[in-house]
Image (cartoon, grey):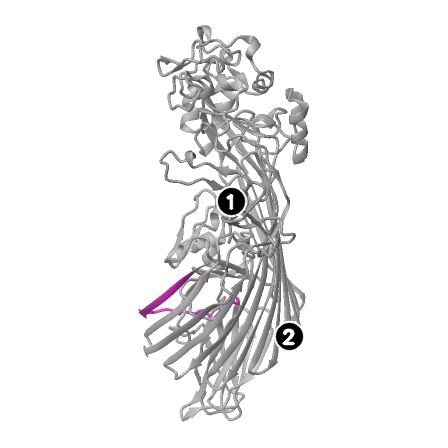
Amino acid sequence: MRFRAALAFGAFIAAASATSVFGQGFQGGLRGAIKDPGGVLPGVEVTLTNEGTNISRSTVTNERGEYVFAAVEPGTYKVKVALQGYKTIDQTGVRIGTQTFITLDLTMDVGRIEENVTVTGQSPLIETSNASQGTVLDSAALQTLPSSGRAAFLVGTTVPTVIPSGDAQFNRQQDQSNASLLSLGGGTRRGNNYTLDGVPITDITNRAVANPTIEALDDVKVQVHTYDAEMGRTGGGVFNTTLRSGTNSYRGSAFFQTRPVWGAANNYFAQKALENCSGSDASCLSKNAKPAQVYYLGGGGIGGPIVKDKTFFFFSSENYHDISTRNGSLLLPTAAERNGDFSQTTSGTTPIKIYNPITHVQFTNNIIPPGMLNPVAVAMLKYLPLPQTNVDNGSANYNATAQIDDYFQQEYAVKLEHKFTDKMRLTGFYMYNRTNEPCSNYYYIGLSDPNRFADPGDYLLKRRPQILAINNTWIPSDNSVLALRFGWTRFVDNSTTTIDFDPATLGFSQAFLGQMGQTGVSKFPQIFTTNYGPGQQLLGAINPSFRTYKSTGGNAAYSRFVGTHTFKLGADYRRIGVNLLNPGCSAGCIGFGREFTSSTGTNNGSATDGNAIATFLLGYPSGELQSSGSLGDNMTLTTPLDIYTNYFGGYVQDDWRVSSRFTLNYGVRIEHEDGMREVNNNFTVGFDRTATSSLSSVVVPGSVDPTGGTAARNVVGGLLYAGVNGNPTQQGNPPKAKWSPRLGAVYSLDPKTVVRGGYGLYWAPYNYPVPSATSNNGNYGQIGFTNNT
């Protein structure tokens, strides 16, 4: 775990309204004082009414003339102030955004209560009730600011100190990974929190589970420099989002966007390859022709009353279809090389030489005898397309444009709101996102060719995020509010093959096929060859993986107004995890380098001494001798995992309005996150360097060390398995309690100048690794077995 301390102090001169943060909940608030020319007025009735839904709340000023409305749903409100013997004040158009707390002091004039003073569209010029700062992006800003993929969280990069570091092309609704690579306020990237209606939607890798359509959003508050104890599990900031609700009027919107095919040019390199294609070479012409890069994006939203003044709905949807491209310039073996003939193979203009791996004698005329060709390798190469230029001089001889057809990806969201009484209301939100994203097939373009199982770029990324958020607001008395929230997310994130394949058709031995059968995945093996294919992977579709990120949690916040103090206390619990099955190299990942067909039979860096395709044809995998691929040679047998961590948080906070000019915000938060666990303890939690095992009887002689500086020793050391022999059940050693003091102060020098300062200690969430069966043994400790476990 890491922590970040933030200290900020500044003076701001403003000519427009500014607002402030009021905790991690999405609701805002309104406070102020009611006076007459002679002083404060206690006992004044203040009514706050939502102009869209007509839902209202009332309170009475205390002995100091102060009033507070806490836990106010974002929206536009009317404030009514009434007291016998004074003119009634009606102020309309008071906008309370996400996490904004408006200070509104009003002065009443003597008169009859039937007389009204109406104020329209006037709001405080500058916020003076909180030291924290945040930027509200309302629906108008979200619709207006440029956003090529309509990703609301990425619009937050228009806010100072919000820095993106992901690949800018990934800005669509299914691009959770890149869109979350943001640093807020100098904090770690992907160390932030994302909420919808106060419910966290951050997964175990600190990504937003989904990117909601802009049509569903009322506003997004980008909270960066905040000093409220209600904010937790973030090392940078929070994207605090309020979802749009229906009103007493039926209202809707719709949009459509397209990018005409005629306005797009062919890729430069594809166009050059196309110009060099023979008129009779249909394959070359089709692979390099300008693709129909269609783009259609449409959606909308509609909301209104189910029961006027009581029950409301809002439904939104967004769908898009586009075809994008990737261009590949690859080196593939020639027709002669596939038959073992390397007599014309060169590196530049220098001929390469291949040697018999048994005798280390160069093959006659650089041709492998037919009887030495491995039948499995020969069978595999039949699925590899021929190069467009039948020459192998070490440079690319095959060009293709892969088409990625995102066919009508869909997102739907609905929010319901119901008022039980004037003191109790309930909202519920559900969102579903469905996307199927193919990858870059350079050999067999598209998803229709029956041989695409051999294409290294063939896979389908299936994502199915779901979000459920429920909010209950209860007003026990005029000076207290209780907010209860429940959140549930599921994010299916599966990388799958698009077509099955029976590896028995390649001629493998029954022993090898039996090992494949244990993994439970039937597919084409991945073949890696030095210098050939995309990224040195010559054959074999993706190794599938199945991930379902999940979280369940609840939080509660209680606010009470006493004198000039607004006290808050609350608690937050989240169980965050992932169901994971990563078969890894289920059909084998096999690498072939130059070493076995080189003059020495050992690792070498010469491009003319040995050849990886020749080694492949002879059937001599390289193992770990040479980097013929990032995976080496292995077959993985993994275990399904149910990973999770528990997070607990609690806080107390006081917002003390010392005077009309000076406000203090102070509090403390305590957090605990108990480390990564597995439901059935199916992983390791560490390594004991002194542990003994069945290998401990083996003596490592001192002569192994060529310097002679190491004495003979027994083999010791071993993995620590979760829950075995008293071992812990969680990884790491997280602190029992993480204390986070918060302090902020704001002072109004005059109506146009405010000085703010604050200090906050934050504990950034641990960046739990992305699941992988091939990186660091799955990134979750030892979860499977390979030849190099």
**Residue 716 shows which numbered tag?**
1
Q: Secondary structure at mark 1?
A: loop
Q: Nearer the viewer, residue 93 or 548?
A: 548
Q: Nearer the viewer, residue 142 or 205?
A: 205
Label 1 vs label 2, nearer the camera = 1
Q: Is residue 93 above or below residue 701?
A: below
Q: Is residue 598 above or below residue 24?
A: above
Q: Which residues are magenta?
A: 3-26
Give, as a three-letter code, the residue at label 1.
Val
> Residue tagged by mark 2?
424
Q: Is residue 329 above or below residue 309?
A: above
Q: Residues within 10 Å of mark 2 (few under 14, many from 20)?
A: some
Residue 750 visible to the viewer: no
- The answer to whether mark 1 and mark 2 are in CB contact below 8 A is no
The percent coordinates of residue 531 (x first, y second) are: 44, 24
Write the residue at 48% across / 37% down.
Answer: 700
The percent coordinates of residue 394 (x first, y second) are: 40, 19
